[in-house]
Image: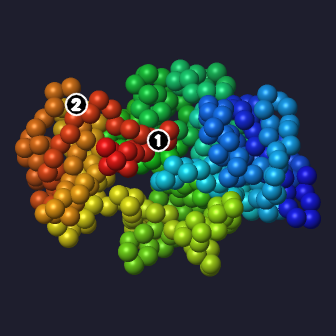
């Protein structure tokens, strides 16, 4: 369904195999798909549709025309909704050229071929799983989609369903390892969506799991670097302020109907500002933090991720998230939110970390909470803690 003015955008309110087949049908017929989480409330859907203006909405297998729908550019094949930092939904316009580049580059990087079978076990309205389907579509590698995340079914999928490659987020990997399932039977377990904690990666390696770290975002059709190596067609550079930038066909066309937000992150020559701080040396991308999460305390730039990595090794710390809170003396003070059954004191934590962290990085305050708020991909929601 392609007209002179562009292609139709079809919002599909569904999940699992039904959503996958609807997406494939859209791609076969020159339409773009907007996967919609069926768990959204009616008011949330109204806001999403008003903002992104699909031409059609598919629900319960029925297709309805949406009033005041607007076409997407011809090259767009998917619009992925993301809330970003403000909570307002944005629509990431992803192109067919990007799908091809990502699909082939990713598969080549993993050596995926006809003897493999991709498993998408996370919701398809997230780019990580939609990209699994797109890679299979582009390369012809067989695929499986689970309707929901079932730990035992995912662990047994190599034996029961012939799956050889699976994409998960760190939280899912943790649950799979806890289950004791035979993850080593996968040829490759891709971990993305959030940084994989070193301790979790080490546990997986000890279990002979073939771990691959993927780095990317919704704006790049998912992962554009595997174990730090950019896939074919992806260029990387580091800006003067340390922010990582990426360019290539896998980069989004734009945020739908939002030229100001688009201009804020996408330069005219195609470089996308990732919002991450890191390095690119000897052909390897290393991410150290989110740019907006860097804490400036006493004029010193401090990485909360670095602090979390150290504090997480304390024997009584179950989970930790570090944020910067306003401080009259220091500008920002380092505050550690800690989940622990027998909470250590701030002095205990400072002493534990003193040999590995410079004085400005040591926490000045510790707050005990029952759970770290996280996104569905496992990223800590620092803004939620800051707002408290």
Q: Is residue 188 left or right of residue 337?
A: right
Viewer-side residue, 68 vs 325: 68
**Image quadrant assignment for residue 38:** top right
Task: Name the secondary structure under disc 1.
Answer: loop
Q: Total label count?
A: 2
Q: Disc number at residue 150?
A: none
Viewer-side residue, 289 vs 281: 289
**Image quadrant assignment for residue 161:** top right
Q: Residue 293 at what x, y percent from top left?
A: 35, 58
Viewer-side residue, 44 vs 276: 44
Q: Earlier in the sequence, mark 2 or mark 1?
A: 2
Q: Residue 26 at what x, y percent from top left?
A: 83, 46
Packing grade of label 2 (10 A; few <14, some 14-19, many >=20) is some
Q: Disc number at residue 375?
A: 1
- Residue 332 in sight: yes
Q: Residue at x 50, y 63 (%)?
A: 274
Q: Residue at x 38, y 38 (%)?
A: 373
Mark 2 to mark 1 CA distance (whole Å): 20 Å
- Label 2 sits on residue: 340
- Residue 116, compared with residue 98, is above or below; it is above
């Amino acid at each position: 369904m392609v007209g002179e003015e562009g292609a139709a955008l079809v919002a599909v309110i569904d999940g699992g195999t039904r959503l996958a087949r609807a997406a494939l049908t859209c791609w076969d017929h020159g339409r773009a798909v907007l996967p919609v989480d069926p768990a959204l409330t009616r008011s949330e859907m109204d806001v999403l549709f008003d903002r992104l203006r699909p031409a059609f909405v598919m629900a319960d297998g029925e297709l309805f025309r949406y009033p005041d729908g607007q076409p997407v550019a011809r090259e767009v094949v998917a619009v992925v909704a993301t809330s970003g930092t403000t909570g307002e939904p944005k629509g990431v316009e992803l192109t067919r050229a990007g799908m091809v580049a990502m699909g082939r580059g990713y598969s080549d990087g993993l050596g995926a071929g006809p003897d493999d079978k991709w498993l998408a076990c996370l919701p398809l309205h997230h780019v990580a799983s939609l990209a699994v389907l797109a890679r299979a579509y582009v390369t012809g590698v067989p695929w499986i989609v689970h309707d929901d995340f079932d730990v035992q079914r995912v662990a047994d999928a190599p034996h029961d369903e012939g799956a050889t490659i699976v994409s998960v987020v760190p939280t899912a990997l943790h649950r799979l390892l806890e289950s004791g399932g035979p993850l080593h039977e996968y040829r490759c377990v891709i971990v993305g969506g959030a940084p994989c904690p070193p301790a979790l990666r080490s546990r997986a390696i000890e279990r002979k799991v073939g771990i691959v770290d993927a780095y990317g975002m919704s704006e790049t059709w998912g992962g554009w670097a595997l174990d730090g190596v950019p896939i074919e067609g992806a260029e990387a550079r580091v800006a003067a302020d340390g922010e990582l930038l990426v360019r290539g066909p896998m980069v989004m066309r734009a945020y739908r109907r939002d030229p100001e937000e688009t201009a804020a992150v996408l330069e005219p020559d195609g470089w996308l500002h990732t919002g991450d701080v890191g390095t690119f040396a000897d052909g390897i991308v290393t991410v150290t933090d989110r740019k907006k999460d860097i804490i400036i305390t006493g004029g010193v730039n401090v990485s909360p991720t670095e602090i979390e990595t150290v504090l997480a090794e304390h024997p009584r710390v179950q989970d930790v998230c570090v944020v910067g809170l306003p401080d009259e003396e220091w500008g920002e003070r380092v505050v550690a939110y800690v989940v622990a059954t027998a909470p250590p004191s701030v002095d205990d934590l400072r002493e534990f970390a003193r040999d590995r962290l410079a004085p400005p990085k040591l926490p000045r305050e510790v707050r005990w909470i029952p759970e770290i708020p996280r996104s569905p991909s496992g990223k800590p929601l620092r803004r939620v803690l800051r707002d408290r």
